[in-house]
Amino acid sequence: MAHLADAKALLDNRGHYTGQTFHGVNPLLLVEKIIRERIFESLYWKEQAFGLNAATLLDRAVELTYIGGQYSNQRPTPFLCLIFKLLQLQPSREIILVYLNDPDFKYLRALAAFYIRLTWGATDIYRTLEPLMGDYRKLRVRGMGGWRMSYVDEFIDELLTKERVCDIALPHIKTRAMLEDADELEPRDSLLGSEVESEGESDAQEDEGTSSGDE
């Protein structure tokens, strides 16, 4: 079938993978076999995702209205189908960063962040995704248990700390602490710490103003 042939496009005529690897494997294998099969059989894959390229995938991605892995009778979400399509297409880092930094489409940002977590190295993952911890926009999540509400910063935190997100087992990477110990990352400034420090400075200025007034 056409959609299955498309899924095998990265294999040579002996069934061997000859393209770029991520974490030492064929990128398609980053999605477990049973989930790959469900993606290939899904209506969204056949009608909306089949044949997309990096440009036309953007058109589909900006139409997303929720994130998630599988729902209902283990059907893959459009979000999951587009993640798999990205693994097939392997867009350049420049294109992925355009997706990630688009200020208007939060689900496009989530899609790019997930792809980065699946395919990039640990140091680049932390450096690229941690700044998004300041994005507090709401995200709708659909899963086997139904619907729930999340936020972009929560989703990013899950990508950096969880073993599975959206029903996908994330590749193992070094923790931030390990990278800091190896001098591969600078210690991270806490957003909360910055806010507290800022509030402390404001309080100090107010106290100084009050003292001056008392004089």
Image (cartoon, rainbow, N blue to C red):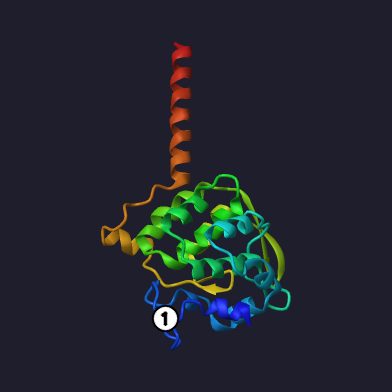
Vertical relation: 94 (above or below) 121:
above
Please name whichever residue, 60 or 169, is drawn nearer the observer in this view of the structure.
60
Residue that extends furthest to the left in the rendered view of this protein: 183
x, y (%) of residue 48? 67, 66
Residue that extends furthest to the bottom in the rendered view of this protein: 14
Q: Quadrant of residue 215?
A: top left
Q: Residue at x 63, y 59 (%)?
A: 60
x, y (%) of residue 123? 35, 60
Residue 47 visible in image: yes
Disc 1 secondary structure class: loop
- Residue indicated by mark 1: 17
Residue 151 visible in image: no
x, y (%) of residue 30? 48, 75
Number of other residues with Cα within 10 Å of mark 1, as a class: few under 14, some 14 to 19, many 20 or more: some
Q: Is residue 140 left or right of residue 10?
A: right
- Exactly how many numbered labels are in the figure? 1
Please name whichever residue, 207 or 169, is drawn nearer the observer in this view of the structure.
169
Q: Is residue 190 left or right of residue 166?
A: left
Under mark 1, the amino acid is Tyr
x, y (%) of residue 140? 67, 58
Q: Is residue 7 left or right of residue 200?
A: right
Q: Is residue 140 left or right of residue 99?
A: right
Q: Quadrant of residue 12?
A: bottom left
Q: Residue at x 60, y 49 (%)?
A: 105
Please name whichever residue, 200 or 211, is drawn nearer the observer in this view of the structure.
200
**Quadrant for the N terminus in the image:** bottom right
